[in-house]
Structures are given as C-alpha cells and as structure tokens.
Image (tube, coloured by chain):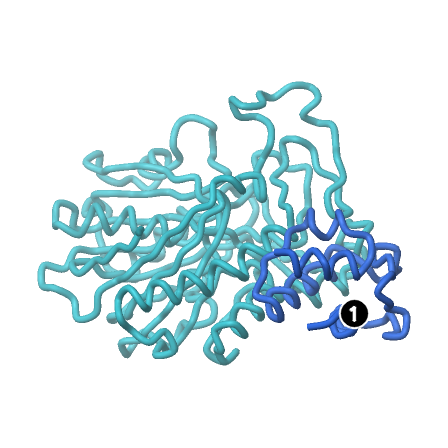
Chain colours: A cyan, B blue
C-alpha cells in the first residue's frame, strides 16, 4: 500500500502567481453545442479564471522571488528544485533546469520534473520531502502549475493558469505532527484525461489537426481532452475512499481537521465528495469560482487565496484530497507550523 | 429501489423538464435539457443511491431510463 510518512520536514511557505488577465464564463464564452455559460457555471462553479500568454515557468519566477523574499531565504541555499507541469517550456529539457538558471540558483542544485496534472502538488511534495527527510538537502522548492499550453488553439472554460511555489526545509528535530500521504493509480484509465498525439505512441502528423467532437466540444489530437463523465465518476469514488484509507492507516479521525482542501476539479464533484464524507462547506475552501481548475496548482492555490490570514499564526490541521491524470489519486494530512503565505502575485502578459 | 423510484430520482436531476415527462421508456438523451452536465448529476445520483460507479459509456449505451436502471442493478 502506498502510504508515506515524513517527520523531519516542514512547509515553510507557499506563494502563487496568476496572469493578471481575467476571462469570465458569461455570454457566449462557453463554446459548446451541449450547454451554455450559465449551465456550465451552475455545475462547475467556475465563474472566471486567469488566462495569459505566460508559460508555467514565467509564472513560477515571480512567485519564487516573492516567496524567497518573504521567507528571507537566500538563493544559494536552495539545493533542490522540482517542477511539476503538463505544459513544459520545451519537450526537452526539464523545466526545473530552466527555472534554476532563470532564478539564478546555485549550480549545486538537484533539478527534476514531473508530468502529473491535478495530482501534481501532493506527488511533488512527496518527491521533495523524500529528498529532504534525511537532511542531505536542507532547503528545496517545489514549483507546480500550468500556464500557456503547448497547443494554444483552445479556450477551455474549466481551466485556469496558475503556478504555485512551495518552500520545504529540513527539521533536525522530529516535528510534532507528521505529514502523511496515501497514493493510488488506475493506469487502465489513462485515456480519461490525456493528449492523444505528439508522443511516441502516436507521433505528430498533419492529421493531428483533425478535430473530433467530445461532449459537444471539438478537439484536435494535440489538445488535452477529458472524458468528463468517467473522470467525474472516478473522482467522487476515489477521493473519499483515499481519505478513509489514510485515516484508518494512520489511526486518526478524518473529521478532526480544521480545513479540507480538495483538488478544484469542479463544484458538483467537490459537493458530492463533501456529502459522502459528511463535511461542512465552511470547512472546505474553494478557489475554483475565481480561478477555475488550476491543475496541479489547485490545492495550494486554494490555501493561498482562501486561507491566507487564517492559518499562519496557529498550527492548523489540513486534509487534502486529489485525483488527476494517470489516473492517479490520493490524500495528505498535514499540520501547519508558522507557515508563510505570500500575497497572490498577478503577472502582466509578455509583450 | 424499484423502477418507479429510479425514474423519479432520474427526473430530479433535471431543472426545467417537467417530472411527468419522465417514464421508464423515455429516451433520456432526446430530451432538450439533456447534456453532459446533467449526466454528471445522474452519475452522482447512482453513486449516492446504489454506491455504484457508472461510466460515460454506460450512459451512452443505454437509451431508456429502464435500460439504465437494469444496468445499474446488474453491476
């Protein structure tokens, strides 16, 4: 069973950056034969989101600069950087190296990328914690999110651009309450959310531009596509199940948390998960109304935009649940310890 | 749960279509209000009432509410 526990790490701080440009889901903004903007907002909750021409790494740089400044960390102290994105700057090399260079970090820096989508922040945390837990690395950054797509001919009313930077540090003394994780996978459902063409399985050809209709919307082979019904069905099943598995394995009552922060897939899905877990809406902050589904950034985006000012000064118990491409899912339990949460950084488009 | 109760719950997933429009032999995908968003509500209803996971293909492959009811029962 994929349970992990870490006792010598802490999240020192989190920052987030989004494009300044707001797109609203109103009028004829939702390009579907199947439903209009009003019906879309009612089900998904996504009233607006941030869309710009910045890549994930463009968003990451100002977020990282702000966080390092707020923490008083020096750039040369950063010994590892993990970048999680589905839309890297280049197919090759990893974006983490590009960011290490752009941020001006020391050359003594471990860099690696992950391609996870909505599961990406928690997967990324488990990578970073694994590097830091034994004290070989003392300070590390995790950058997660998606900005401009590698194939831009698509306005998806669900998704928003955002990048979140999480600062992690080693704690020599065992922390009071450990970080606990559970992970699951269902690879047979890889095509629930995927980009069918452009990889080695189906290399890019001229026919990659041909469009097919899915749930009333047109997609080419290069665009991320989602089987909405199957993804929804999986999400409402696996998120509550993982949270129950985590709490049973580590012997805690999942109800005994201050906040429940779920991946911001859509409102209908989270409402169903809350109902199944018997959770009060007031304990389940959501960023999806204003920022949409921000993929791997969605959980920490929710912490930055909804919990800033509420959790910095006292240990706060958070339970996070997620699912995403793969398909993958899981849950994480953490207690904050003097966490620094930076002001949301809004970034102008590149000229 | 019997078929009539299922038809009633199915109808509750719609906002604008009158409840009397729903019969066991209703071709639900031909209803004006049917959409991939209503399908999500139907999936939630089945999950909640039956604790069973139905797929997009299940919804596509059934025509009438009764066929979907029978499919859920067989899972």
**Could you say where residue A97 lies in the image, as x and y percent from the top left?**
33, 34
Q: Can you say which quadrant of the picture contains the C terminus of chain A?
A: top right
Q: Is residue A145 left or right of residue A21?
A: left
Closer to the camera, A70 or A168?
Answer: A168
For the question of whether residue B22 can be seen, the reply is yes
Q: Is residue A210 left or right of residue A230?
A: right
**Could you say where residue A102 lies in the image, as x and y percent from the top left?**
36, 38
Kindly identify the residue that appears in the image at 75 percent across and 45 percent down.
Answer: A217
Kindly identify the residue that appears in the image at 21 percent across and 58 percent down.
Answer: A6
**Could you say where residue A77 lies in the image, as x and y percent from the top left?**
19, 47
Please identify the quarter of the rendering in which residue A10 is found. bottom left
- Residue A299 vs A61, above or below: the answer is below
Instruction: Give the structural element (helix, strand or loop) at label 1.
Output: helix
- Residue A153 vs A229, above or below: the answer is above
- In the rendered image, the residue lying farthest to the left is A173
Kindly identify the residue that appears in the image at 69 percent across and 65 percent down.
Answer: B41
């Amino acid at each position: 069973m994929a349970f992990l526990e870490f006792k010598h790490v802490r999240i020192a701080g989190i920052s987030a950056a989004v494009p300044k440009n707001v797109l609203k889901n109103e009028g004829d903004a939702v390009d579907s034969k199947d439903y209009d903007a009003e019906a879309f907002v009612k089900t998904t909750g996504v009233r607006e989101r941030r869309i710009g021409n910045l890549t994930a790494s463009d968003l990451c740089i100002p977020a990282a600069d702000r966080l390092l400044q707020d923490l008083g960390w020096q750039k040369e102290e950063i010994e590892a950087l993990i970048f999680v994105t589905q839309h890297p700057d280049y197919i090759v090399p990893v974006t983490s190296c590009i960011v290490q260079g752009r941020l001006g970090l020391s050359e003594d820096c471990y860099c690696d990328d992950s391609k996870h989508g909505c599961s990406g922040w928690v997967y990324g945390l488990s990578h970073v914690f694994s590097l830091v837990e034994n004290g070989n690395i003392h300070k590390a950054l995790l950058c997660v999110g998606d900005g401009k797509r590698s194939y831009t001919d698509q306005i998806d009313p669900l998704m928003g651009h955002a990048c979140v930077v999480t600062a992690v540090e080693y704690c020599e003394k065992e922390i009071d309450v450990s970080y606990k994780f559970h992970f699951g996978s269902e690879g047979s459902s890889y095509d629930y959310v995927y980009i069918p063409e452009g990889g080695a399985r189906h290399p890019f050809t001229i026919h990659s531009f041909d469009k097919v209709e899915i749930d009333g919307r047109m997609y080419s082979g290069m665009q991320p596509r989602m089987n909405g019904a199957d993804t929804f069905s999986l999400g409402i099943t696996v998120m509550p199940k993982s949270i129950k598995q985590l709490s049973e394995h580590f012997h805690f009552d999942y109800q005994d948390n201050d906040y429940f922060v779920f991946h911001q897939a859509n409102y209908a899905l989270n409402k169903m998960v809350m109902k199944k877990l018997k959770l009060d809406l007031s304990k389940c902050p959501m960023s999806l109304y204003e920022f949409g589904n921000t993929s791997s950034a969605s959980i920490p985006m929710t912490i930055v935009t909804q919990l800033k000012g509420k959790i910095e000064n006292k240990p706060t118990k958070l339970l996070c649940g997620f699912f995403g491409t793969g398909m993958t899912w899981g849950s994480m339990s953490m207690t904050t310890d003097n966490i620094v949460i930076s002001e949301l950084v809004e970034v102008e488009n590149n000229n | 749960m019997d078929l009539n109760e299922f038809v009633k719950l199915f109808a509750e997933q719609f906002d604008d279509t009158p409840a009397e429009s729903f019969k066991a032999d209703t071709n639900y995908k031909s209803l004006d209000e049917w959409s991939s968003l209503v399908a999500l509500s139907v999936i939630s209803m089945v999950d909640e009432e039956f604790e069973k996971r139905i797929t997009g293909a299940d919804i596509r492959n059934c025509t009438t509410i009764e066929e979907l009811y029978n499919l859920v029962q067989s899972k």
